Amino acid sequence: MADLDGNGSNDILWRNSSTGANVIWQLNSTTYSTATALPELASANWVNYL
Ligand SMILES: [Ca+2]
């Protein structure tokens, strides 16, 4: 996991490898806070290492 928005709590990045869709779950401590959808990447071959 990684703190993607810099608020001090780790966030979870989800990726759908078949559609290229990306979603961030922002966590407040260990509690789900906000889901943020990111623009889809054209290629489903991208991989993240977070
Ligand atoms: Ca965060």
Image (cartoon, rainbow, N blue to C red):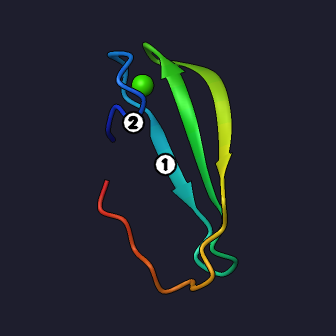
Amino acid type shown at disc 1 = Leu
Q: Residue at point 66% right, 67% down?
A: 40
Q: Residues within 10 Å of mark 1 (few under 14, many from 20)?
A: many
Q: Is mark 2 within 8 Å of ligand 1?
A: yes
Label 1, secondary structure: give it.
strand
Quadrant containing ligand 1 reads top left
Find out if the beta carbon at label 1 lies less than 8 Å from the nearest ligand 1 atom.
no
User: Residue 4 bears which disc, if any?
Assistant: 2
Q: Amino acid at mark 2?
A: Leu
Quadrant of residue 33 in the image? top right
Q: Is 19 or 31 nearer to us in this picture? A: 19
The answer to whether 4 appears left or right of 35 in the picture is left
Q: Quadrant of the N terminus?
A: top left
The location of residue 5, given as percent across then percent down, is 42, 29
Q: Callout 2: helix, strand or loop? A: loop
Classed neighbour count for the residue bearing mark 2: other residues with Cα under 10 Å, few (<14), some (14–19), many (≥20)? some
Of callouts 2 and 1, the N-terminal one? 2
Q: Where is residue 25 shown, x and y percent of the image?
A: 57, 36
- Res 15 quadrant in image: bottom right
Residue at the disc numbered 1: 13
Mark 1 and mark 2 in contact (Cβ < 8 Å)? Answer: yes
Q: Is residue 17 above or below residue 25?
A: below
